[in-house]
Amino acid sequence: MIYDKKFNRRFISIIIAIFLTATFSAVAAQTNDKDLLIPMGNAIGIQAETKAQTEFQPGTRIRDRMVGVGTVTYLNPSTNQFGALGHGIHDTESSRLLLLESGKISPADVINVKRGIPGEPGELRGSFDLNENIGELYKNTENGIFGTTDAMPSAHQPLPVAEPNQVRTGDAIIYSQVNGGEVCEYDVEILRLLNNRDSRNMIIKVTDEDLIAATGGIVQGMSGSPIVQDGKIIGAVTHVFVNDAQKGYGIFITNMLKAETAECGVELSVA
């Protein structure tokens, strides 16, 4: 029998390569299963009851109830937890983050759009049934609101989460509901990446002609619209530039996820 050392080394190398490939694939599959999120874009009606807040200065009035329209960013299919808005719910007079006693969400239809113009941000005007509850809120933070749901359908497939160093300037898409009950895909451009720790991590510009025709760009109520780039969910729309409705800020998705799991923020009490 002839012993070929070169052949034997090649054979061993092939076996090792197959083993490592299988191992890395298994690890990647486990990581992806854990980290995949569904980009949503659904408009929701938000109802929040606030706690009594005695620590504010005399004369400061804090509303005991807040009702509005926002957008869901992501749904975790493994836990049915969702994140929305990309920023917190604040009192309009004091600008303080609201302390919430309870909160729930309802499906919403966009019935009208107030277009954004320079100096005057636009607005999605939605219709929803206050008695139709599809989810409960449990946390309000500066980087988003969070809750659970088992009744929020989506036509989108789960996507991996992008780390900040994987986000680049250039073309991207957002999912948003700006007409009726349909979530649509729109083109945007990421103009600049920022090192801020808050909800302003990137500057984005709407380039989609259909969205510009419908809304003028970014309007109030689109906060939370997920941003997708290179097959990954990278963040959410959070703010619009007052003097340029086609431009606004976005938050990294990782900052929303950190806010969801962090101890800081305003947890909702459980009755």
Image: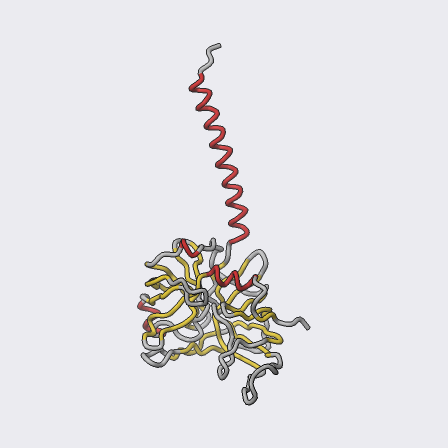
Quarter containing the C terminus: bottom right
Q: Tell me the residue at 32%/74% (across/down).
A: 244
Residue placed most toward the observer, 101 or 220: 101
Residue placed most toward the observer, 19 or 114: 19
Residue 136 makes an appearance in the image: no
Q: Give above or below for 113 relative to 20.
A: below
User: From the viewer's perspective, is 166 left or right of 24?
Assistant: left
User: From the viewer's perspective, is 182 left or right of 242?
Assistant: right
Hey, which quadrant is residue 110 in on the image?
A: bottom left
The spot of residue 140 in percent (x, y) is 55, 71
The spot of residue 37 in percent (x, y) is 50, 57
Q: Tell me the residue at 33%/71% (across/down).
A: 246
The color scheme shown is: secondary structure
Q: Give above or below for 258 relative to 61.
A: above
User: From the viewer's perspective, is 39 left or right of 120?
Assistant: right
The spot of residue 174 in percent (x, y) is 40, 63
The spot of residue 78 in percent (x, y) is 57, 56
User: From the viewer's perspective, is 228 left or right of 57?
Assistant: left
Residue placed most toward the observer, 212 or 218: 218
Q: Give above or below for 131 relative to 11.
A: below
